[in-house]
Image (cartoon, helix red, strand yellow):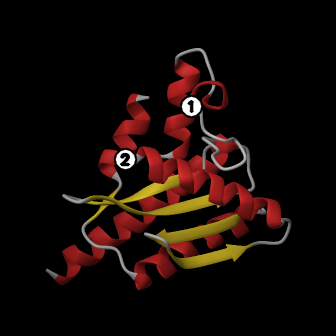
Amino acid sequence: MPELQEQEERLQFDRFDHDDAWALGTRLVELARERGHGVTVDIRLGDHQLFHYALPGTSADNDDWIERKIRVVRRFGQSSYRVGQSYRDRGTTFEEQAHLEPARYAAHGGCFPIILRGTGPVGTVTVSGLPQLDDHRLVVEALELFLDAKRAETETTA
């Protein structure tokens, strides 16, 4: 759990817009293609879907998982994996204890909040198609690469 909390504290944006969604989304798609992963990628700012792409090997089921994971992140303000892990760490499951409809909420890895520094969660970046920890790790890796590139870009123009 401390590692999951640290990720959310570290992987924050100073700003996030449509162009950032495109760049982050295409980065995620590139990573998935390089590894032969069949995933669906979704990025939203509030309720506005800014990026959505389904690689070969995915289906409408992945879209359903994305919606369910997003509801968890919006409700709890934390990554879907972190929410699910908090229940597992207590020896139970989200499905047993959250008292939320499983057909609408899935505390499975793959959805991460887009957090603006000083503001809080403003959107989501979601992957569906791999085992939940792998979905989570793919999103975290893409966020790290994206934010590192943004920092480097800022440093070279400063």
Please tell me whether mark 2 or mark 1 is closer to you in this view: 1
* Quarter of the N terminus within the rendering: top left
The secondary element bearing badge 1 is classed as loop
Give the residue at x 86% y 66%. Answer: 57
Q: Position of residue 122 (x, y in %)?
A: 36, 64
Q: Quadrant of residue 33?
A: bottom right
Up/down of 53 relative to 129, above or below: below
Towards the viewer: 107 or 27: 107
Q: Which mark is residue 98?
A: 1
Which one is earlier in the sequence, the residue at label 2 or at label 1?
2
Q: Amino acid at mark 1?
A: Ala
Give the residue at x 64% y 59%. Answer: 67
Which residue is identified by label 2?
8
Up/down of 123 relative to 85, above or below: below
Towards the viewer: 87 or 41: 87
Q: Quadrant of residue 80?
A: top right
Q: Which mark is residue 54?
A: none
Q: Is residue 153 left or right of residue 60?
A: left
Give the residue at x 48% y 71%. Answer: 47
Q: Quadrant of residue 88?
A: top right
> Separation of disc 2 and disc 1 at Cα?
22 Å
Q: Amino acid at mark 2?
A: Glu
**Residue 37 in sight in this render:** no
Give the residue at x 55% y 53%. Answer: 71
Up/down of 147 relative to 21, above or below: above
Up/down of 35 relative to 107, above or below: below
Q: Position of residue 101 (x, y in %)?
A: 66, 41
